[in-house]
Image (tube, helix red, strand yellow):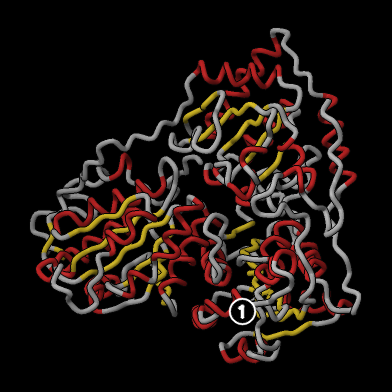
Amino acid sequence: MTATSLSSHSIADGATETTPGQSGGSTPGAAPRTGAEALVATLQRLGVDTIFGLPGGAVLPLYDALYGAEGIRHILVRHEQGAGHAAQGYAAATGKVGVCMATSGPGATNLVTPLADANMDSVPLVAITGNVASTAMGSDAFQEADIRAISMPVTKHSFLVTRPDDVAATVASAFHLAASGRPGPVLVDVAKDALTALADETRLQLPMPGYRPEHTAAPEAVRDAVELMLTARRPVLYVGGGCIRANASEEVRQLAELTGIPVVTTLMARGAFPDSHPQHMGMPGMHGSVSGVATLQKSDLIISLGARFDDRVTGRKDTFAPQARIVHADIDPAEIGKNFPTEVGLLGDVKDTMVALMTEWTRRTAAGAAPHHDAWIRRTQGWKRRYPAGYETPEDGALAPQYVIERLGALSGPDTVFAAGVGQHQMWASQFITYDRPRTWLNSGGLGTMGYAVPAAMGAKVGRPEATVWAVDGDGCFQMTNQELATCSVEGIPIKVAIINNAALGMVRQWQSLFYSERYSASQLPSMQVPDFRMLAQAYGCVGLRCDRPEDVDRTIEAAMAVDDQPVVVDFRVSKDSMVWPMVAAGTSNDDIQHARDVRPDFGDDE
């Protein structure tokens, strides 16, 4: 992956910005502050403008200090998981650090799923939890849980604060850790007595030994990489979500146009390079485009930019891109060579790395070096023409989910933000909506968390109130976190939700259709009437709409788009038999991709 900016949440080098006498520091004669008040003052100094949270006993001192705090909006969620996913959506849509807050015990443990999700997808997040008093820790006190130990495997780091003097420095360090290097979630767990006791805010520096992210790739590695790029016959730029985290989309475009090399963008990188660009071959992976999968599979050089060679991209590892050498650019040294041997590793910020690659490429070509991949470009374009995205209209006249999502993208406009749940609707939303701008596609990629869409859309809308924000959800996913519609209604957050309702856990059902002899064990949802999503939306104070005919799709979407002061939920009743194609079955080779159920593409012989 790659580095991201602290954006508005910035204390240089982690924690040394404030000195005694400045705002937030201890001033002679000033009233002393509690640890909770020091924490809130630190958040204000960092520029935090939004917190998603739910109070409880252990964290009440912090909520009391937050009461009336200038510049910070607290959004009361209906479940702590919603707070975490909302903070993720806020962060992914804005590039800032998302912030969520919960109490001890079950409040804190309800944040574990969004923390794990943010960790997999490198989303900058700070979670602040209260805990029982330090004197009670280890005694099985009421609502006690060792959230630091629980969360350590799924966070970039977890802190436990038991002294009020450490509160400000730890929070500042948490923001620095979350946003710098490879972004990710950081948890700060604060004992209740550290929140209530008086704090010495002159202690603002917390050492972080060993944490020194490398931002500049070695010059000799850059030279070696460009040499491979110039001599390769079938190169591909394999663009991952790190390019979005690094705000490096413009550099991706410049590098692609300078070199002429075809581009594939992962599920996490949709919008990092425009879908409409002629060099874009699509998305690789299990449900990627044929041209995207083939371009990776038949390449002789993969230039990986902020991607991690996920198993859903590579398919069966021993058959993945068998003729390709790999140049791997990443800010996390653990990723380089982790899954596949790397010819050249470019350790550093991917944005800076691409600038260095372009500089060296320009120097080499000015000196007479020339690439030799014209035949490869023609070949990849042939795959793109021959195997476009498509779908079959249901024979029974039922509504095709792909058509709904295609029209949703067409009618919403290029600046619309889409947050998807997990399953068939997620894949269709990645396939049938055109993404030409970064931070317009949000999803749970690595962890695959059902229930992500609604709270993530809520967070995105708070962070970017000027944008239209759609949650594209399944009827299964929606029922996991739909309570956050109450938050949206009360807080005036007018998201729009498109439920792709096929009365089933769609992706599970698809696998059962293809691989389990149509034995639909525990994947059928009883009825499209239970619940009635339109009435449920109205009960939450939202506008509820329903559509089950193709001729009504545009009119329904336009009606939803016309509402700008309330959340809107649209129940699209779609065919339960629609499947996601193309598909590389789990555990098989990318060479075995199916364009449709009985269609296997012909990649042709290697040049």
Could you tell me which residue is drawn at 65 percent across and 74 percent down?
505
The residue under label 1 is which amino acid type?
A: Ala
Q: Residue at x 64, y 77 (%)?
A: 521
User: In the image, is 449 to the left or to the right of 50?
Assistant: right
Q: Which residue is mark 1?
A: 522
Q: Quadrant of residue 566?
A: bottom right
Q: Position of residue 68 (x, y in %)?
A: 31, 73
Q: Nearer the viewer, residue 44 or 396?
A: 396
Occupied quadrant, residue 539: bottom right
How many marks on residues?
1
68 up-or-down from 163: above or below: below
Return the residue nearer the eye: 248 or 183: 183
Observer-nearest of 386 and 359: 386
Q: Position of residue 535 (x, y in %)?
A: 65, 92
Query: x and y percent of residue 304 in the render?
Result: 60, 34
Q: Is residue 122 above or below residue 113?
A: above
Q: What residue is rendered at 39% in x and 71% in y?
A: 110
Residue 350: give x, y in percent of width and height. Answer: 53, 34
Please tell me whether mark 1 sits on a helix, a strand or a loop: loop
Q: With respect to residue 430, does 504 lie above or below?
A: below
Q: Residue furthest top?
A: 367
Q: Residue furthest front?
A: 517
Q: Which quadrant is the C terminus positioned in? A: top right
The residue shown at (47%, 36%) is: 331
Crowd band around label 1 with a 10 angstrom C-alpha radius: few (<14), some (14–19), many (20+):
few
Q: Quadrant of residue 373?
A: top right
